Image (cartoon, rainbow, N blue to C red):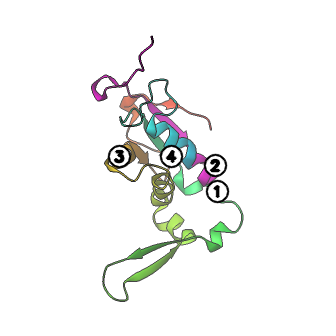
Amino acid sequence: MLKTYIAKTETVERDWYLIDAKNQVLGRMACKIAMILQGKTKPVYTPHVDTGDFVIVINAEKIKLTGNKMEDKAYYTHSGYPGGFKKHPVKTWLIKHPDMVTRLAVRGMLPKTKLGNGMLKKLKVYAGAEHPHEAQQPKILEL
């Protein structure tokens, strides 16, 4: 009788992957990043253990959105005070905070638990082509 393998947090080996977001469609890229962060691309995937890898995304300012999303899509925030509701069009956020657009797309595809918050911390997003993670020797991942 075979026993099911259950990964332990201490024994998980984490790799670093580098993704160039230039001319990538946001949703399709975010889906693949979420799979890597969760560890679903590994044979040792265990749902209740964070078995995922680190992901570095560069050129986040050069992503593509399909359809009319550049004009229609917006992010909403509320300060908690009366009248504190704000609407932020994605077009302005790509100029001001290009890393947040990618981060929020991936965050929506991860579990809404403490485990999901830990997975999101392994995502490093940079607007330009430079990143400070050369020492980790990331593997270039083509999507």
Label at residue 121: 3
Q: Which residues are magenta?
A: 1-29
Measured as percent of width and height from the top left, residue 65 is found at 65, 60
Q: Tell me the crowding category of disc 4: few under 14, some 14 to 19, or many 20 or more residues within 10 angstroms, Cα based.
A: many
Q: Amino acid at mark 3?
A: Lys
Mark 4–mark 3 Cα distance, whole angstroms, equals 16 Å
Mark nearest the camera among 1 and 4 is: 1
Do the residues under discs 4 and 3 have CB atoms within 8 angstroms?
no
Label at residue 64: 1
List the residue tagged with mark 4.
58
Mark 2–mark 4 Cα distance, whole angstroms, equals 11 Å
Q: Residue furthest top?
A: 1
Q: Earlier in the sequence, mark 1 or mark 4?
A: 4
Residue nearer the viewer, 59 or 64: 64
Give the residue drawn at x 35%, y 51%: 113
**Left or right, 45 with reference to 26:** left
Measured as percent of width and height from the top left, residue 68 is found at 70, 69
List the residue tagged with mark 2.
24
Q: Tell me the crowding category of disc 2: few under 14, some 14 to 19, or many 20 or more residues within 10 angstroms, Cα based.
A: some
Q: Find numbered disc 4 in the image and state the secondary structure of the residue it sits on.
A: strand
Measured as percent of width and height from the top left, residue 41 is found at 52, 31
Q: Is residue 18 magenta?
A: yes
Q: Amino acid at mark 2?
A: Gln
Q: Tell me the crowding category of disc 3: few under 14, some 14 to 19, or many 20 or more residues within 10 angstroms, Cα based.
A: few
Identify the image quadrant of the N terminus.
Answer: top left
Q: Amino acid at mark 4?
A: Ile
Q: Earlier in the sequence, mark 2 or mark 1?
A: 2
Q: Earlier in the sequence, mark 3 or mark 2?
A: 2
Mark 3–mark 2 Cα distance, whole angstroms, equals 22 Å
Give the residue drawn at x 39%, y 53%: 112
Mark nearest the camera among 3 and 2 is: 3
